[in-house]
Amino acid sequence: MSRRAVVAGLGIAAIAAGGIAGGIAATSGSGSISLSASSSQTRESHHGHSWNMGSGWVFNKIDNQNDPTFNQLLGINNRGQIAGYFGSGAAGHPNKGYLLNLTHDASFFANENVPTAIQTQVIGVNDTGVSVGFWSSQNTANQTNNNFGFYTWQGRSYNVNFPTGNNASPPVNQLLGVNDRDVAVGFYTDAAGHDHGYAYSIPGHWFARVRVPGASSVSASGINNRGDIVGFYTGRHGTVHGFLRERDGDLVRLSVPGASSTMAFGINDEREVVGTYMVGSGSSAKTFGFVWVPWRHGFATINDPQGSGATTLNGINDAGDLVGFYTDAAGNTDGLLVSRQQIQAPFAQAVNPVQQAQPTTPVATTPATVPSGVGPTHF
């Protein structure tokens, strides 16, 4: 896989990461969330006014010591849980997912991997502990691997793959965010290589498309408890822009002034949006994290001091804590937590060898219908 087109993950020309543990794939029901010009108001946000984080904020390097060379922190809830993974996704260096629990009493890493998966990335976690992401049964040298979406609920993992016959080869399905109503968002890639954003209700087992007018590819990457959705899309001339689709249908297109691309990854209940933007291209490209606040009408650049020009922000909670990752001077990818206190990475238990073993039988790539009575029934 690859992580949001920024850093290689499970090895696919896609945008996120995750896993499942032999669960049930959900395919029933399909709706439509259309951001058409006739049904939504489009607002542009190109203002460049910056704001300061103020004193008291600390940049924390948080790495799982199972692999101190490659960690990404991708989602954070209001209970001190952080979704992430270690491992670059290169051949022999598979992604392994985890939840980092930060509490006053005890802090610890909890491994979260699909038992039959070779690779897992955990991308998002809500306040009830439901996590989402994607997994792969492959770890190829060219990193072009299959991807399957998943969610974990009450200790069990379930496949989620958008019901379509127009899949990429290998297939790509990823869940990238989830709110407290257990509605997840993500995307799948079609046979032509175009991404299609969607929302998925875990308790309702329904799908709904997320569209942006004029876009050739759309990825939905974050959702808050209001039902606002953020993500990114490919527009004219192949330029990537971020977007905020508000629950009432309004569409805000997010483009950092002077950036060659802008991608929105996370949103909290205050509609504060985080993501990354790129300046330049090729070997001269630099990436910076950003926070966009609607009432401030602009972007704030957030850079880890050890990863200037190589910082990505991926998640934000309602307290304004930020998670992401950066590349340091040694070339390592380090997990990043921006909070109001100094945090030390806790001890990490080794991943169960069974979870790292190659499966003896191929993992099914065709989603199955969720049987009645399986999975959550609340909403």
Image: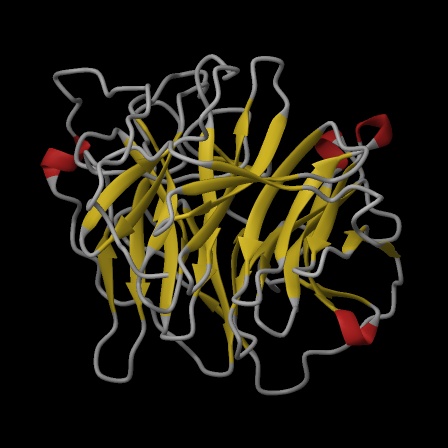
Query: Can residue 4 be seen here?
Result: no
Q: How is the image coloured?
A: secondary structure
Q: Position of residue 10 (x, y in %)?
A: 41, 31
The residue that appears at 52% across and 29% down in the rendered structure is 188
**Side (left or right) of 194 relative to 203:** right
**Side (left or right) of 184 relative to 33:** left
The residue that appears at 72% across and 45% down in the rendered structure is 286
The residue closer to the viewer here, 144 or 217, is 217
Query: Can residue 54 be seen here?
Result: yes
Q: Position of residue 28 (x, y in %)?
A: 38, 34
* Total count of labels: 0
Quadrant where the C terminus is found in the figure: bottom left
In the rendered view, tell whether residue 218 sits above or below residue 80. Answer: above
In the rendered view, tell whether residue 267 sits above or below residue 111. Answer: below
**Side (left or right) of 123 relative to 135:** right
In the rendered view, tell whether residue 21 sits above or below residue 346. Answer: above
Residue farthest toward the bottom in the current orientation of the protein: 55
Q: Position of residue 333 (x, y in %)?
A: 48, 47
The residue closer to the viewer here, 291 or 308, is 291
The residue closer to the viewer here, 379 or 5, is 379
Quadrant where the N terminus is found in the figure: top left
The residue that appears at 26% across and 67% down in the rendered structure is 346
The residue that appears at 64% across and 53% down in the rendered structure is 230
Q: Position of residue 23 (x, y in %)?
A: 21, 36
